[in-house]
Amino acid sequence: MVDAFGAMNAVGLLAFAAAGALKGVDADLDLFGVTVLGTLTALGGGIVRDVLVGRIPVALRTTTDVGLAFAGVVIAVVLAWLLGGRVRGHPVVALSDAIGLAAFAATGALVGIDADLSAFGVVVLAALTGVGGGSLADVLLGRVPAVLHEDFYATPAVVGGAAFWIATRFDVATGSATLGCAVVVFALRVLALRGDWRLPTIG
């Protein structure tokens, strides 16, 4: 549990902090705003996850998570500088976001199994951990959260969480199930970006 969770959590924190900070750069926020947006994107989903299973959020019990989030923001600032501030629509934003989604969906599913949740609970935790931070960041930017209206985003997290639960039912090792969940989510998200997959709208 600890090794698999720690590895995925670190990857998710760095990737989501970078993705959130780059969105802040794109929105012309100042350095403080970019830092807040990146940190919230990185920590928001994990805080929601931990509250739902009745435990003090990991981000509040250790400085490691905040440190990794700040490191992700620094990476984003350097990337934005190298790109001349032109990050709108750049693949690095989408890639960072896809990596964060995959890693955090895996941590959500892992925590769900550890908390002995039902299949539905595991899937919900995977999805909320994956999309929670980005949704909070969108609210700060005054946008309808992308998960509610844009392309194929939360669905990969749902599928990944279900795949994780099924794998554990077949006694697949936790580490392997966690990695498999992340791979499924990342692959689906990248395919969705390349193929411009979108769920149907009503009307």
Image (cartoon, helix red, strand yellow):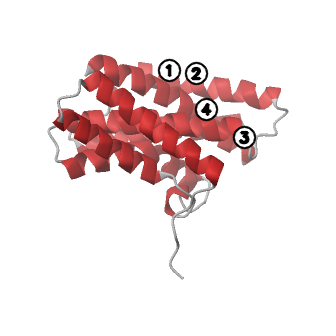
Q: Please rate how many residues cluster around mark 4, counting C-alpha atoms within 10 Å: few if below 14, some from 14 to 19, many from 20.
A: many
Q: CA distance from mark 3 to mark 1?
A: 20 Å
In the picture, residue 16 is in which quadrant? top right
Q: For the C terminus, which image quadrant?
A: bottom right
**Mark 2 or 4 closer to N-term?**
4
Query: Label 2, on which residue?
Result: 71
Going by the image, does 129 lie left or right of 86? left
**Mark 3 or 4 closer to N-term?**
4
Q: For the N terminus, which image quadrant?
A: top left
Q: Are marks 1 and 4 in contact (CB under 8 Å)?
A: no
Q: Please rate how many residues cluster around mark 2, counting C-alpha atoms within 10 Å: few if below 14, some from 14 to 19, many from 20.
A: some
Q: Secondary structure at mark 1?
A: helix
Q: CA distance from mark 2 to mark 3?
A: 16 Å
Query: Label 4, on which residue?
Result: 18
Q: Amino acid at mark 4?
A: Ala
Query: Label 3, on which residue?
Result: 25
Where's residue 14, x and y in %? Answer: 53, 26
Query: Label 1, on which residue?
Result: 67
Q: Secondary structure at mark 3?
A: helix
Q: CA distance from mark 3 to mark 4?
A: 10 Å
Which sits in the foreground, 149 or 57? 149
Q: Amino acid at mark 3?
A: Val
Q: Residue furthest bottom?
A: 203
In the picture, residue 76 is in which quadrant? top right
Asked if residue 58 shows in the view, the reply is no
